Image: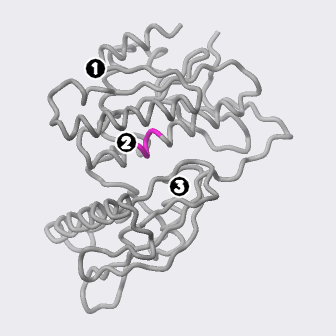
Amino acid sequence: MELFQPAVRLDTPSQHLAAPPFVARFSPVFWEPVPGTGERVVVLIAVEPDAGSKSSVSPGTYCVLPLLRLRALLGVQRGTAAHGVLRQAAEFMTLRQQAGVPLEDLEAPFHGFILGPQLMGRGYGIEQLLDAAVRSVSAFGSADALVDDETVSERPRHTIKTQEFLQAIRRQVAGDDPERRARFEKSLQPSLDLPELTVDYAWRQWLLQVTSLPGTKRQSMNTLRESQSKLYEIDVIRRHMQGNAVKPVLLINTDTLNGAASEEVVKEATSMLDRLLRLAKAEQLDVIEASSPMEAAEHVNALQ
C-alpha cells in the first residue's frame, strides 16, 4: 500500500507551526529606470545571514526585477540591456559579500543604484524570505521572479538544469504509466498548519529530492538555494509525520564532473558536492550520485 497520497493531512491539535528558520538582514537596492523622473524601484536585494537563523543563509545579492517586467517598462531592447546590467551588479555585489564585505560597506558597481537601509527578514525558505523583503520595500508589492530568469525554470523549485534532469528521469521511470508519473512532483500536506509541500518523488516510504551540481561558477548560488530549500521541505515533512517511517534521499546530478567542463568549473562543482554531502549528512539523508538520467532512473527503480 502506498504511504503517501496527494495533500496528505497528518496533523494533530497539539501541533503548531514552527517559527520561520531563515532569518537574515537585508538591504534593498533602488534604481531609477527613467532618469529624471524621481521614480525608484527595488531591483536587487542584498542578503546577509543573521545569528538568529536556524537554517543556513548564504550572503548574496539577488535580482528581483524580472526580464519580462523590465521589457514592459522600458521596451524590449532597453529592458534586455537593463537586465544584463542588473545581473552584473548582483554578481559583483555577491562576490564582494563572499569576500567578507558587510552590508553597511557594500556598494553597487554602477551609478544610479542606491543602497537602502538594513532591515530584517524571515521566511520558511530563501524565496519566501526574498519575497517578504520585496513586499516590505517595493511599490510593486511582490517579486514575480526571485532569481535570474535565464537560470530558473517556470517552476521556481528547480533550476533549469535540475528540471530537465528530473523530466528525463520521469520519462525513463514512468513512460506513459499514470500511476508511476503520479509519484513525481508529489504534493503533501503533513499538517493543517502547513501549506502543501512538493517532493520531487514520493512512493511508499521514500521521499526523494533532486538537485544538480553547477555547470558554471555563476550557478553555484542557485544550486545551493535550490538544495537548501528542498532539504528544508523534506525536514518539515519528516518532522510532522507522527513517527511514520520515511526514508529521505537526496539525488545529486553529477554530470558536471564527467570531464567536459573546465578545470575551474569542475573545482566549483566538486566543492559544491562536498557541501551537499555534508548538508545531507546533517539532515540524515541518504545520498545518490548519478551522472546521467539513465543512471538516476536505475537508482529510482531500485527504491522498493
Looking at the picture, does residue 302 appear above or below residue 99? above
Which residue is denoted by mark 1 in the rendering?
A: 292
C-beta proximity under 8 Å, tags 2 and 1: no
Magenta residues, as a range?
Answer: 223-227
Q: Which residue is mark 3?
A: 128
Q: How many marks?
A: 3
Bin the neighbour count of mark 2 within 10 Å (Cα to Cα): few under 14, some 14-19, many 20 and up: many
Give the amino acid at mark 2: Thr
Residue 231 location in percent, x, y?
53, 36
Residue bearing mark 2: 223
- What kind of colouring is applied to the model shown? one colour
Mark nearer the N terminus (1 vs 3): 3
Q: Which mark is in front, 1 or 3?
A: 1
Q: Is residue 304 above or below residue 106?
A: above
Q: Nearer the viewer, residue 85 or 270?
A: 270
Q: Is residue 234 magenta?
A: no
Q: Position of residue 43 (x, y in %)?
A: 36, 70
Cα–Cα gap, marks 1 and 3 = 31 Å
- Could you tell me which secondary element the residue under label 3 belongs to? helix
Secondary structure mostly seen in magenta is helix
The structure residue drawn at horizontal position 26% and vertical position 26%, both measured from the top left corner, is: 255
